[in-house]
Image: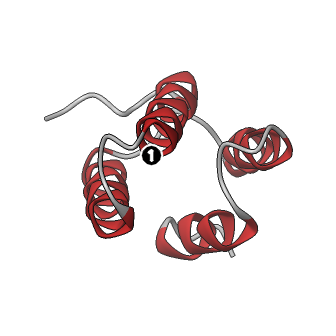
Amino acid sequence: MTTPIKVERLTKELEKLHEEMISGAYGHGEYDQRLARMIQELRERGIDADRPQITAALDEALSRGIITPAVKDHLEKRLGLV
């Protein structure tokens, strides 16, 4: 059995993904692939947080410009938060 991912790690991974995208490390298509892999891992391992904590983390990431509204909506749908 695998350990659930902490919400702090989710935030750090989203920040890292954002920074790599901005730095030009990879293009839009690769960003989508990496985001999909991240979501798959979250779904498989689970998140060690409740819905309000996850939603708050996504809201903060959105307000800081780490994710777009579309990415936030996508994450919420794929993680079953809406």
Question: In front here: 62 or 6?
Answer: 62
Residue occupying image coordinates x 64% and y 67%: 81
Give the amino acid at mark 1: Met
- Circle 1 residue: 21
> Could you say where residue 55 lies in the image, as x and y percent from the top left?
74, 50
Q: Quadrant of residue 73?
A: bottom right
Residue 16 location in percent, x, y? 45, 30
Residue extending furthest toward the left: 1
The relative height of residue 26 versus residue 22 in the rendered view (above or below) is: below
Q: Position of residue 48 (x, y in %)?
A: 49, 33
Left-right relation of 11 to 24: right
Residue at (50% x, 65% y) in the render: 79
Q: Is residue 4 above or below residue 81?
A: above
Q: State the quadrant of the C terminus.
A: bottom right
In the image, 66 versus 27, the foreground residue is: 27
Residue furthest out toward the front: 24
Which residue is drawn at the image coordinates 39% and 43% (left, top)?
Answer: 24
Residue, far right: 63
Query: Dot 1, crowdedness within 10 Å: few (<14), some or many (≥20)?
Result: some
Q: Quadrant of the N terminus?
A: top left
